[in-house]
């Protein structure tokens, strides 16, 4: 589940294709090229190894996992989920593997363990949090001891090659803090110090990130083109023969053949000087032009065959890696904003106190309330759990994100809730309770929980925002949720906490009261139609059970 | 590839044709003018299959010629890259051979002739395999694949290959006759 196979792919591709790439412009003297060779490889390696090193070395990583282990022990007390629904990586194993079969160099990386020993809580984990993905280019330049201009040129080249995605933005020191906060989440704590020194002036910062999905495609396409070109040449397939007049240097193609034939002999003749035309062999065998046509052709064929074989042999590790990677889920980092948002969410989850929360959220809003798509993580979540998201196709995203920011130790905080919210929780609890007697209680509980959560969230927004914003928010939720602004996301965590706390206080008091039947309905368009229905269903089941 | 399509043309008819058979004269002239021509856009006009409509004539000042807009149906032939055609060899030389598929001239360069065929000059230049079983000479029929076309306003020229599966000689010159 790590990016390791992909990193290896990048490394191999770098060595195979970008070994002799220089980033000097063509206008520079050729003699200056030598010293720059191989820099492309170094840069690509740095991008991947930035991932790997923080991946296994990050202290926060351990903290996070150990916190979750602790949480699992509490799980039965604080959570109304069935704790056996383990979806968390229970542990992380450091795996040491010799790099490319070499006994001297070892690579270490973490394997998250989702196996039978997984612990109790339904919590989506985004693997992207474990390693640093978006790198500020200045930092990278510092790490590599390169001039930033030099690095930028290389990166631009890679951008054109579709290996990296870059993002540029003008930002103040404040904006930079968001990045460093995100960075801190991935275990690289050193950056925070530097950012404090930045002035309040706007600076243009560039960030770059490996685009693994695209790299995979690019590498495959490149190899395909290489092979196809050679094969075509080898078979002389689809190649239009070129002819050159040795005397005047004019060149013709086979399409001109009709004009070139002469009645006197069986050769083509130049239109201009009437010289005898010579078939031009391909560039690959240009030096063998001199001798007889047949001979040259044969030798060229040999050469092409040789090259094709060499490709097969020398790129074997790369093709192997490609096949290995083929079925793996590609690590996706999303855009820079999305990544930052996720990372800071993880920080929140780890620290878990509201003061931190508040400061982060204010930062986030100060940053401009940029839309944050939370798309990538949901996919991961679905693949893992397959349980609770399955039945809510239209709205898995907020579910996933909300789940993520729910560490158990946040439950201590109380919030003032509205009637509706209380009702929500109450009903949900009822369902949950009765459901535990039923057969598929866990699933129902999860579903109910989500529904209640949505309703509560929406309610909160209604309170917060003006009435005219309401529709907009609903639309956002019912749509892909890619438009959830930063601020909204912040509120989700709070809301969640508050809801839980409320439940703890209230549920036994209100348990026996018949819940208002249509309670979860909040006049929100898309969300509530399914919620209402399933809620009714579960009510029926309850009565039957009782 | 053949297409059946509707084309339009302005026909100029000399005043001496005016009379009871004006329409027949017009159609005859149309066939004479159009059949066998080549336009880069549509290809070779092989045959006119029908005349849809003949518009009102317009008398040209000074000459007395009358212009009729004529809509007609015709079969056109346009070669495409990748198309497989059967063609008759018209000329063989050291650079390859020329063949004709109907109105289209196709050149197959010696690169695109299978490697086991060697050029033999002489009275009847030909390409022949080492065991002599297959021979390409004038009037041989070959199946070839078009790999390139040059389309001018009034001319289409093609490059073909016989270096592929199921391509090559399909009929010896003597066999058909």
Image: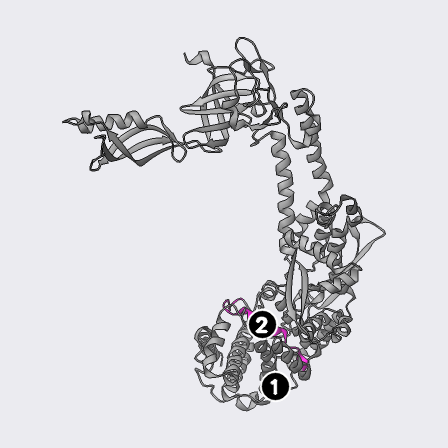
A396 or A177: which is nearer to us? A177
Q: Relative to A420, is A377 on the left or the right?
A: right
Q: Which residue is mark 2?
A: A370
SS of the residue under disc 2: loop
Q: Residue furthest bottom?
A: A509
Instruction: Decide which of A426, A288 is in the foreground and name it.
Output: A288
Instruction: Label 1, secondary structure: give it.
Output: helix
The chain letter under disc 1 is A
Q: Earlier in the sequence, mark 2 or mark 1?
A: 2
Quadrant for the N terminus of chain A, please: bottom right
Residue A100 versus residue A483 in the image, above or below? above
Residue A267 is situated, as x and y percent measured from the top left of the image, at 57, 18
Measuring 26% from the left and 32% from the top, which residue is drawn there?
B11
Left or right of residue B39: residue A235: right
x, y (%) of residue A421?
A: 52, 85
Measured Cα–Cα span from mark 2 to mark 1: 30 Å
- Can residue A25 be spotted in the picture? yes
Q: Are marks 2 and 1 on the same chain?
A: yes
Quarter of the view holding residue A181:
bottom right
Q: Which residue is mark 1?
A: A501
Tell me residue B27's x, y (percent). 24, 28
Q: Nearer the viewer, mark 2 or mark 1?
A: 2
Specify whether residue B95 is painted magenta: no
Q: Which residue lies at the image location 52% right of the left edge and 81% below the top edge?
A: A461
Q: Which residues are magenta?
A: A390-409
- Farthest-out residue, front: B62
The answer to whether the residues at label 2 and label 1 have Cβ atoms under 8 Å apart is: no
Q: Subunit of mark 2?
A: A
């Amino acid at each position: 589940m790590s990016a390791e196979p992909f990193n290896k792919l990048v490394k191999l591709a770098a060595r195979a294709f970008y070994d002799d790439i220089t980033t000097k412009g063509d206008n520079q003297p050729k003699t200056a090229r030598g010293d720059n060779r191989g820099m492309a490889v170094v840069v690509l390696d740095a991008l991947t190894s930035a991932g790997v090193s923080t991946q296994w070395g990050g202290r926060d990583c351990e903290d996070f996992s150990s916190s979750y282990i602790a949480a699992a022990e509490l799980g039965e007390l604080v959570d109304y989920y069935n704790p056996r629904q383990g979806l968390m990586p229970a542990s992380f194993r450091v795996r040491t593997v010799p790099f490319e079969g070499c006994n001297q160099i070892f690579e270490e990386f973490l394997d998250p363990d989702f196996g039978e020993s997984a612990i109790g809580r339904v919590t989506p984990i985004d693997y992207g949090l474990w390693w640093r993905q978006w790198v500020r280019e200045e930092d990278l330049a510092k790490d590599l001891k390169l001039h930033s201009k030099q690095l930028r040129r290389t990166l631009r080249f890679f951008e054109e090659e579709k290996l990296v995605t870059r993002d540029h933005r003008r930002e103040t020191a404040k904006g930079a803090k968001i990045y460093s906060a995100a960075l801190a989440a991935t275990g690289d704590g050193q950056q925070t110090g530097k950012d404090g020194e930045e002035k309040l002036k706007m600076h243009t910062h560039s960030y770059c990130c490996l685009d693994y999905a695209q790299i995979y495609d690019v590498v495959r396409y490149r190899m395909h083109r290489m092979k196809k070109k050679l094969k075509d040449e080898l078979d002389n397939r689809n190649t239009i023969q070129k002819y050159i007049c040795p005397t005047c240097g004019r060149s013709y193609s086979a399409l001109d053949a009709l004009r070139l034939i002469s009645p006197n002999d069986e050769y083509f003749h130049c239109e201009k000087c009437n010289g005898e035309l010579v078939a031009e062999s391909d560039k690959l065998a240009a030096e063998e032009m001199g001798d007889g046509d047949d001979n040259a052709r044969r030798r060229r064929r040999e050469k092409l065959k040789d090259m094709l074989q060499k490709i097969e042999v020398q790129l074997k590790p790369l093709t192997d890696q490609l096949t290995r990677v083929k079925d793996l889920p590609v690590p996706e980092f999303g855009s820079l904003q999305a990544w930052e948002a996720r990372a800071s969410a993880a920080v929140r989850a780890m620290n878990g106190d509201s003061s931190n929360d508040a400061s982060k959220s204010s930062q986030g809003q100060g940053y401009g309330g940029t839309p944050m798509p939370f798309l990538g993580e949901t996919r991961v979540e679905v693949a893992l759990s397959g349980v609770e998201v399955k039945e809510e196709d239209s709205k898995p995203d907020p579910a996933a994100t909300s789940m993520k920011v729910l560490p158990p130790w946040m439950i201590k905080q109380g919030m003032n809730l509205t009637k509706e919210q209380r009702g929500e929780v109450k009903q949900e609890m009822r369902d949950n309770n009765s459901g535990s007697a039923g057969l598929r209680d866990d699933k129902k509980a999860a579903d109910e929980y989500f529904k209640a959560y949505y309703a509560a969230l929406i309610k909160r927004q209604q309170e917060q925002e003006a009435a005219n914003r309401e529709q907009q928010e609903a639309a956002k939720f019912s749509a892909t949720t890619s438009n959830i602004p930063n601020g909204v996301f912040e509120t989700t965590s709070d809301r969640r906490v508050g809801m839980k706390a409320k439940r703890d206080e209230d549920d036994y008091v209100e348990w026996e009261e018949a819940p208002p039947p249509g309670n979860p309905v909040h006049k929100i368009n898309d969300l509530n139609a399914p919620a209402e229905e399933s809620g009714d269903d579960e009510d029926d089941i309850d009565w039957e059970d009782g | 590839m053949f297409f059946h399509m509707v084309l339009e043309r302005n026909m100029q008819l000399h005043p001496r044709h005016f009379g009871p058979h004006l329409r027949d004269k017009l159609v005859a002239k149309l066939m004479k003018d159009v059949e066998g021509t080549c336009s880069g856009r549509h290809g070779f006009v092989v045959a006119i299959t029908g005349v849809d409509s003949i518009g009102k004539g317009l008398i040209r000042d000074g000459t007395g010629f009358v212009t009729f807009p004529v809509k007609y149906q015709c079969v056109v032939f346009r070669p495409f890259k990748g198309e497989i055609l059967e063609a008759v060899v018209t000329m063989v030389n050291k650079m390859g051979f020329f063949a004709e598929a109907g109105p289209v001239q196709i050149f197959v360069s010696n690169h695109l002739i299978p490697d086991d065929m060697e050029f033999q000059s002489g009275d009847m230049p030909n390409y022949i395999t080492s065991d002599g079983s297959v021979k390409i000479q004038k009037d041989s029929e070959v199946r070839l694949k078009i790999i390139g076309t040059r389309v001018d306003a009034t001319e289409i020229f093609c490059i073909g290959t016989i270096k592929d599966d199921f391509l090559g000689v399909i009929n010896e010159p003597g066999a058909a006759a």
